[in-house]
Image: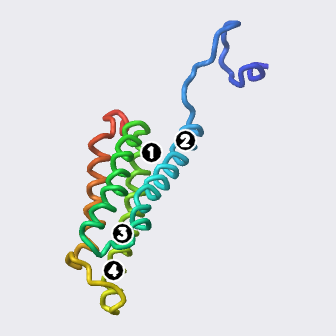
Amino acid sequence: MAFEPLQTDETRAPGEAADASRDMDREMLFGCSGFLLASVFGYMLSIWPFIAFQQTERLATLGLAIALGPGVAAAVGMVITRRYKLAGACGFVGGALCTAIFMYLRLQHGFISAMAKQAPRPDYPESFALLVPGAYVLLCVFLAVLVMPNDSLA
């Protein structure tokens, strides 16, 4: 039977190797798992400074947390995008979206606590609660498009 040794109906000469082409199932599994790993890794890498440095109502502490978390995650996300193309870019941006939601809630928490007189008032404007996460997402989308290889969308 033609299908038995090679699992194909192609006839080959004895000793001739099969084509090493990529199949759709393998590509989908790699893309989905790569997306998941990139987004979770980027999110975890982004949020740890906000947990480690609790005084994010101070602009200096907020800047340090952004530099050590989302800043490093953006650099790693660019490397992941360059290496894993579209799946890496989608994971990078997906992690950035989760990070933006976390940052919004964390920054908003500072203003709510200050209004309840439980914490000092942040030394930056309340608009930062939307501007900082939004700017981070836009930056990550821009960086992903910038470093993505041209042939990955073809």
* Colour mapping used in the image: rainbow
CA distance for labels 2 and 1: 8 Å
Residue at horizontal 58%, vertical 19%? 19
Task: Give the residue pinned by disc 3.
Answer: 103
Residue at horizontal 30%, vertical 40%? 147
As drawn, the label of residue 87 is 1
**Looking at the rendering, in which quadrant would you find the C terminus?**
top left
130 versus 69 height, above or below: below
Which numbered disc flags the more N-terminal residue, 3 or 1? 1
Task: Give the residue pinned by disc 4.
Answer: 110
Out of 141 and 56, give the one closest to the viewer. Answer: 56
Task: Give the residue pinned by disc 2.
Answer: 30
* Percent coordinates x, y for residue 73 in the rendering: 38, 52
95 versus 26 height, above or below: below
Out of 73 and 16, give the one closest to the viewer. Answer: 73
**Looking at the rendering, in which quadrant would you find the N terminus?**
top right
Residue type at mark 1 is Ala
